[in-house]
Image: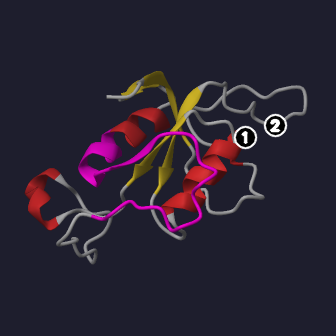
């Protein structure tokens, strides 16, 4: 039920926890500099991939929405234990999560109007790697 959106994906290379950060002038794929001499902002409409951690899901999605995102993919940074060998931790000391994280409203998300969902680390890492090669990814959220 409901609608679907299909747009290009940009990776913020950020947790999007700081609302004062001008994340739209960074991330991947990189863009040419504009007349200000800075990297051009993300071209709307777009889906923004952000890293999990450092603040609530609501804060991340709100900041992405303010930056012009039409949808948000939150890239998990921790493997699920039941993912087995399909998920590679970022370091040898990282422990896996025994339960799937719950992406929920913290009670302050009434102003958010865009869709968002959490991608497991084993699914998000290849997309991030591809975007970091300055290649465009198109995704559908439905």
On residue 14, the disc is: none
Q: Circle 2 sits on which residue?
A: 38
Farthest residue, direction right? 36
Secondary structure mostly taken by the magenta-highlighted segment of the chain: loop
Front disc: 2 or 1? 1
Q: Image point 59% across, 64% down: which residue?
A: 108
Residue 15, percent from left and from top:
55, 58
Q: Residues under labels 2 and 1: Cα distance?
A: 7 Å
Q: Secondary structure at mark 1?
A: helix
Give neighbour class at mark 1: few <14, some 14-19, many 20+ (Cα, 10 Å): some
Residue to which mark 1 is pinned:
25
Q: Position of residue 131 (x, y in %)?
A: 46, 34
Task: Name the element at disc 2.
Answer: loop
Residue 112 magenta-highlighted: yes
Q: Quadrant of the N terminus?
A: top left
Q: Magenta region: which residues? A: 101-126
Residue 27 versus residue 97 in the image, above or below: above
Residue 75, image x, y percentages: 40, 51
Q: Is 61 in front, or is 123? A: 61
Q: Residue at x 65, y 25 (%)?
A: 44
Where residue 126 sits, quadrant-wise, is top left
Seen in the picture, residue 31 relative to 74 is either above or below; the reply is above
Q: Tell me the quarter of the image containing the C terminus.
A: top left
**Up-down: is 78 above or below 86?**
below
**At 41% from the left edge and 25% from the top edge, which residue is drawn?**
3
Between 77 and 32, the one nearer to me in the picture? 77
> Between 121 and 132, which is closer to the camera in this rendering?
121
């Amino acid at each position: 039920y409901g609608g679907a959106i299909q747009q290009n994906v940009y990776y913020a290379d950020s947790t999007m926890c700081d609302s004062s950060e001008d994340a739209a002038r960074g991330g991947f794929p990189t863009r040419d500099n504009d007349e200000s001499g800075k990297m051009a902002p993300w071209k709307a409409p777009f889906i923004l991939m952000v890293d999990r951690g450092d603040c609530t899901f609501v804060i991340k999605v709100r900041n992405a929405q303010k930056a012009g995102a039409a949808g948000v993919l939150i890239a998990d940074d921790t493997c699920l234990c039941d993912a087995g060998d399909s998920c590679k931790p970022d370091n040898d000391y990282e422990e896996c999560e025994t339960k799937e994280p719950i992406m929920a409203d913290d009670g302050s998300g009434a102003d958010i109007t865009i869709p968002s969902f959490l991608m497991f680390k084993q699914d998000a890492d290849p997309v991030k790697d591809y975007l970091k090669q300055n290649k465009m990814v198109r995704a559908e959220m439905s």
